[in-house]
Amino acid sequence: MYKTIIEGKAKIIVPKEEKISKELPVFYNPVMEFNRTVSILLLNVVENQKMQIADPLGGTGVRTIRFLKELPKSKLKEIWINDVNKEAVKIIKQNLRLNKVKAKVFNEDANLFLLKSFGFDYIDIDPFGSPNIFLDSAIKRLGRDGILAVTATDTGCLAGSFPKACLRKYWAMPQRNETMHENGLRILIRKVQLLGADHNKALIPIYSYSKDHYFRAFFRCEKGKTKVDKIIKLHGIFNNAGPLWLGELWNKEIAKKISLQSKDKFLKIIAEESKIPVVGFYNIPKICKRYKLNMIKQEELIRRIKKEGYKVAETHFAPNSLRSNIELKKLIKLF
């Protein structure tokens, strides 16, 4: 029923089933290893004193164990891990013993677990599906200057496959086009920010991305009505999608530091595009088709854009696409 695997510096017991579903006796998704790795990279570079950390949807305990084994002790005050599933709690305790690390373990509904606490410096919401039902409780218990990490795996809804569901769940209209993943991430960010506004908490994205079957965003919490008002002013429509977040998706210094810790090409692409604070990007094949232009190599197009004095970088959101502050008319001329 269970097998032992290695993820990062953690050795953990996980279910043997090959098919990943929420019906697993204890939930573990190997595809999300990258998600957990990025969390560690981010916490390594942010300016925080010792953190009180919450893992409300613990599963096998892999995220908490990796935090305990891969983050410096100077970053960690205490980790509280929770799961509503009694079997999961048994496995979490077993995995903590196996790795010779300690955390406070709870067996509660995730919202009750959060609301019964006194608050945290970092809360990680990484559910199967939409994060919506956990967001209000997490935001209530997020401390000043704390970090909230949110994963959404209902990308079909956010990226335009199910527009009515997106309207119901995220209060925005998605679009199924070349920018759908960026739009979906920005719709998610706005929803989190609106819930933060209820509690006079400005939730500012410091790092975010779209990968595989999920969207991921990290927010820094700043308190105050004026700061919340500034956030809401940056909500609007883009490419007939929205309302969504029109501000920056990254703190470029954090993006740079994350990429320097890793050789991963995906993270290096994000670090470069984080330097260009524009909403959306150009899909080169679509532009060529629409304006009857001959394709040219991406490297050559980048060279031409830079020669004209504009910023340009690949985007992680879509292949054959560039983020740039060049106007469309000038871009067409470069072909």
Image (cartoon, rainbow, N blue to C red):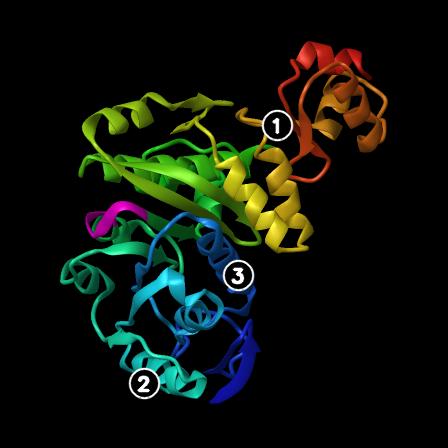
Report whether residue 167 is seen.
Answer: no
Q: Mark 2–mark 1 contact, CB under 8 Å? A: no
x, y percentage for residue 36?
Answer: 49, 62
Which residue corresponds to mark 1?
Answer: 281
Q: Mark 3–mark 2 contact, CB under 8 Å? A: no
Write the residue at 33% across / 79% down. 102
User: Left of 35 or right of it: where is 203?
Assistant: left
Q: Determine which quarter of the picture holds residue 193.
A: top left
Q: Under tag 2, what secondary structure?
A: helix
Return the disc, 3 or 2, that comes first in the chain's sequence. 3
Which residue corresponds to mark 2?
Answer: 90
Q: Nearer the viewer, mark 3 or mark 2?
A: 3
x, y percentage for residue 49?
Answer: 34, 54
Q: Is residue 140 magenta?
A: yes
Q: Which numbered tag is attached to residue 37?
A: 3
Q: Determine which quarter of the picture holds residue 255.
A: top right
Q: Mark 3–mark 1 contact, CB under 8 Å? A: no
x, y percentage for residue 82?
Answer: 28, 70
Q: Under tag 1, what secondary structure?
A: loop
Q: Residues within 10 Å of mark 1 (few under 14, many from 20)?
A: many
Q: Is residue 212 above or below residue 85?
A: above
Q: Residues within 10 Å of mark 2 (few under 14, many from 20)?
A: some
- The chief SS type of the magenta part is strand
Give the magenta part as a residue range. 139-146
